[in-house]
Image (cartoon, grey):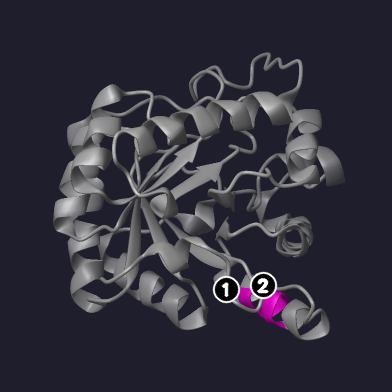
Amino acid sequence: MGDLRPFLRRRPDGRCRLMGILNITPDSFHADSRVNLDSAVERAMEMWTNGADWVDIGGESTRPGAEPIDPEEEMQRVIPVIKAVRKANPSGLISIDTRRFEVARAALEAGANMVNDVSGLRDPEMADLVLEQGCAVCVMHMQGEPGNMQQNPEYDDVHKEVYDSLKETAAALVEGGHEPGLICLDPGIGFGKSLTHNLELLHSRSDSNYSILWGVSRKSMFGQLLGRTDTSERLSGTLAVAAHAMLEGVDILRVHDVQAHADLLITLATLRPEVDA
């Protein structure tokens, strides 16, 4: 696949890279993101055509209150999809959204390029796998577990605590020999955070030298902020954050609606050419 480092950094014209979401699940919070083997290849190809740099494939819902599934079931969901998508587009960039090292290993063997771990490499075996494979990795912050993370999240200084934790994990990878340019940090909007915490994290990106990914697409914060209870009503709020993210220098946006985000970012880059890398 060549050097992946440029694809973890925003584009030369200042646009964020886009990561399209493919959920091979029956219960992910946004129903339109759910696909099966029959529809996944078509959806992935559509995302790449519409401007996605990455397609992120996941087989376990980690929405608030979600119950964990068996790793074997997770692999049965995602591995055939990754193989089919890879066959359809040998050069497309694929991320595996998992917190299980055995699923990540199988996904990399099937053709994935990046591990996107919502648990932030808590499992030492996941960190060992990333170091062994030398693959791209996204380290996300999550306080607690999906089943309990929204019960009572607490921080003294959420921005500092979240990014200090992420940078500590990244530094351990680098110390172990991993290429810094293949590490992406995600503050984990909605994962063990209140609305206030989310807004503080979105106020500005970290001053980290690592790539930064934001995943806010259609999340519950827009229900709280705007009163939009249905995920189908949350695109406008999501796009507003995307515009802000580009101006803040965020590198990657993980999104459900690739074409809408690509249109927004191209237009903004045209209107604001001073926004550059």
Counting every numbered tag in the picture gives 2
Residue 253 x/y as whole percent = 59, 58
Residue visible at 50% across and 25% down? Answer: 146
Q: Which mark is residue 144?
A: none
Label 2 sits on a secondary structure element that is: loop
* Disc 1 from disc 2: Cα separation: 5 Å
Residue visible at 78% across and 56% down? Answer: 237
In the image, 58 versus 231, the foreground residue is: 58
Whether residue 119 is visible, yes or no, is no
Residue 56 x/y as whole percent = 40, 56
Q: Quadrant of residue 176?
A: top left
- The quadrant in which the N terminus is found is bottom left
From the image, tell me which residue sits under label 2: 14
From the image, tell me which residue sits under label 1: 11
Label 1 sits on a secondary structure element that is: loop
In the image, 91 versus 193, the foreground residue is: 91
In the image, 190 versus 170, the foreground residue is: 170
200 with respect to 41 (left or right): right
Few, some or many residues within 10 Å of mark 2 (<14, 14–19, 20+): many
The stretch in magenta equals 262-266
Q: Main secondary structure of the magenta part?
A: helix
Residue visible at 23% across and 32% down? Answer: 128
Residue 257 x/y as whole percent = 59, 66
Q: Quadrant of residue 277?
A: bottom right
- Callout 1–callout 2 Cβ contact below 8 Å: yes
Residue 133 x/y as whole percent = 20, 47
